[in-house]
Image (cartoon, grey):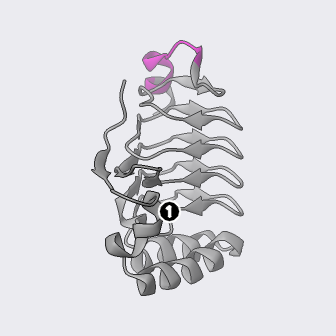
Amino acid sequence: MVRNVTRYPVEGHNSLWYIYRTVSPWKGVRNFIFIQIARYCPILPLKNWIYRRMLGMKVGKHTAFGLMAMVDVFFPEKITVGENSIIGYNTTILAHEYLIKEYRLGEVVIGENVLIGANTTILPGVTIGDWAVIAAGSVVHKNVAAGSFVGGNPLRELRPSSTEEHAEQV
């Protein structure tokens, strides 16, 4: 399935040269500072407070971001993570991508009770369903169904989803 992104073509130089036409440089600097604090913060409630209050992300109760997790510096407000999910160590969540002839923006929605393994990259415009498990080191370039166990690059299903299994865990 194609990611849900909005495409913005540019003329001339590569699209990253036009970054400050799309986002304020002050917002970028401010967000960078708060993201760096959150990346190293070992106190989960404080980390989530920074994400919610300072960056405008939607983060559910009891969600845990591992050490060094990196959220989108320019558009963190486009990221939603449901309750009781785990975002693994050094995972990157992007809501933008700047290419040569265009840039793209897209919401990232991560469901409830989702486990994202360490060193995973989540691209813009992706939705990850409730109870999904993403293996460490994956590149999430497409939507992930609820209850799926996926991994790799390119992303593929590692085990068929089992909704009955998740109903028992509730």
| Magenta span | 157-167
- State the image coordinates of residue 126 (x, y, percent, origin top left): 41, 40
Residue for point 45% across, 61% down: 13
Compared across the picture, whether 103 is left or right of 134 comes to: left
Q: Height in image: 135 above or below 27? A: above
The verdict on residue 110 being magenta is: no
Which residue position is annotated with label 1? 72
Q: Residue at x 39, y 55 (%)?
A: 80
Residue at the (51%, 31%) spot, across then down: 132
Which of the 4 quarters of the picture holds residue 138? Answer: top right
Left or right of 85? Residue 143 is left
- The foreground one among 51 and 73 is 73
Q: Is residue 86 left or right of residue 83?
A: right
Q: Amino acid at mark 1?
A: Asp
Q: Report x, y in % for residue 59.
A: 42, 61
Up-down: is 128 above or below 158?
A: below
Residue lying at 71% horizontally and 73% vertically, measured from the top left: 40
Q: Secondary structure at mark 1?
A: loop
Q: Position of residue 88 (x, y in %)?
A: 66, 50
Depth check, front residue: 32 or 151: 32
Taking 1 as reference, is 87 left or right? right
The quadrant of the image that shows the N terminus is top left
Q: Residue farthest to the front?
A: 12
Q: Position of residue 92 (x, y in %)?
A: 60, 53
Q: Label 1 crowding class (10 Å Cα cut-off): few <14, some 14-19, many 20+?
A: many
